[in-house]
Image: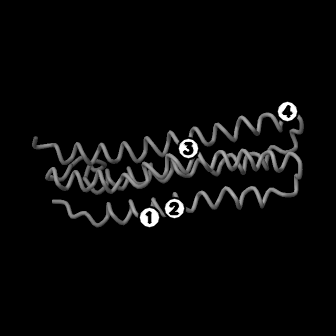
Amino acid sequence: MDNLGLFLAILGAALAAGFSGIGSAKGVGLVGEAGAGLLSEDSSMFTKVLVLQILPGTQGLYGFLIAIIVFTKTGLLSGTPVAMTWQQGVAMLAACLPIAIVGYFSAIYQGRVSASGVSLIAKKPTELIKGMTMAALVEFYAVLALLISFLAVNNITLG
């Protein structure tokens, strides 16, 4: 039971990176599938498709960032973990949940919107900005979740 707090903090970091990463992989994959169809017809659209495909990948980066912050704050990156109570571990785990949950779902939905953007540029190649704008609106909620997780993790007192 001495390491329960640290275990819970590591679990939170794993959920943040894992779920947001899974969502990003799914979102990027959805756009890749749509983009491959367009590129089989017109390979000159590669850059536009790539821009749309990159967008749902950011949630995975956000979750990874929170995991790194947790590992830094708990001393795991330096090799000298701090002593944590189970309550501090629960707090750390809870602080990671916003980006874990919102990151997962927003990446998938952003992938779906970006895949629709691929359909848009297939018919109207000059409309990339509109496709990007619609996808960026989904990103806004991932950014809010990142901010909440960041603030929550940084406001937990350890030691």
Q: Amino acid at mark 4?
A: Ser
| Position of 45 relative to 65 (above/below) | above
Q: Amino acid at mark 3?
A: Ser
Asked if marks 3 and 2 touch (Cβ < 8 Å), the reply is no
Q: Amino acid at mark 1?
A: Leu
Q: Residue at x 56, y 52 (%)?
A: 58
Residue position marked by numbered label 2 in the rendering: 143
Asked if marks 2 and 4 touch (Cβ < 8 Å), the reply is no
Q: Quadrant of residue 40?
A: top right
- The CA span between labels 4 and 3 is 24 Å
| Position of 43 relative to 67 (above/below) | above
- The CA span between labels 2 and 1 is 6 Å
> Which element carries disc 2, helix, strand or loop?
helix
Residue position marked by numbered label 3 in the rendering: 24
Q: Quadrant of residue 26?
A: top right
- The CA span between labels 1 and 3 is 18 Å
The numbered mark, 1 or 3, whose residue comes first in the sequence reads: 3
Left or right placement of residue 135 versus residue 24 in this view: right
Q: Residue at x 71, y 34 (%)?
A: 33
The numbered mark, 4 or 1, whose residue comes first in the sequence reads: 4
Residue position marked by numbered label 1 in the rendering: 147
Asked if marks 2 and 1 touch (Cβ < 8 Å), the reply is yes
Residue position marked by numbered label 4 in the rendering: 40
| Residue 10, numbered label | none
Left or right placement of residue 102 versus residue 7 in this view: right
